[in-house]
Amino acid sequence: MPKRILQGTVTGDQNNQTITVSVERRFKHPLLQKTVRKSKKYRAHDEANQFKIGDTVRIQECAPMSKTKRWTVVLDA
């Protein structure tokens, strides 16, 4: 099964080698037919501490690295 890749904005970078990424998804409400925005925060591993607040990043699923960290930053070449 392929690993999920999500795109979001960095909202926190205070911890060492960890960033908080806010991922927003949009969908149409099944009954009201209104576009709904939902966001969720993920904690991702940033090996080199190179991403700062406001950066747009892509994160990929990985094996658990800590109690809350299950994602890692994808470095696009």
Image (cartoon, rainbow, N blue to C red):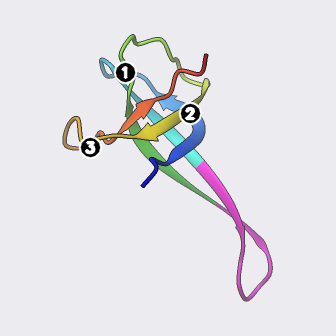
- Magenta stretch: includes residue 28: yes
Q: Residue furthest bottom?
A: 31
Residue 21 drawn at (x, y percent)? 49, 37
Q: Residue 68 carries which label?
A: 3
Q: Mark 1 points at which residue?
A: 14
Whichever of callouts 3 and 2 sits on the residue coming sooner in the sequence is 2
Under mark 1, the amino acid is: Gln
Cβ atoms under marks 3 and 2 closer than 8 Å: no
Quarter placement of the N terminus: bottom left
Viewer-nearest of labels 3 and 2?
A: 2
Residue at the (52%, 17%) spot, across then down: 52
Any magenta on residue 22? no
Front position in the image: 62 or 43: 62
Q: Disc 1 and disc 2: Cα gap in Å?
A: 19 Å
60 left or right, relative to 24: left
The residue positioned farthest toward the left in the image shown: 67
Disc 3 to disc 2, C-alpha distance? 18 Å
Name the residue rendered at 79%, 75% in the picture: 34
Secondary structure of the residue carrying tag 3 is loop
Residue 6 as seen in the image, left or right of residue 71: right
Q: Residue at x 80, y 81 (%)?
A: 33
- Which region shows up in magenta? 24-37
User: In this figure, which residue is indicated by the disc labeled 2?
Assistant: 58
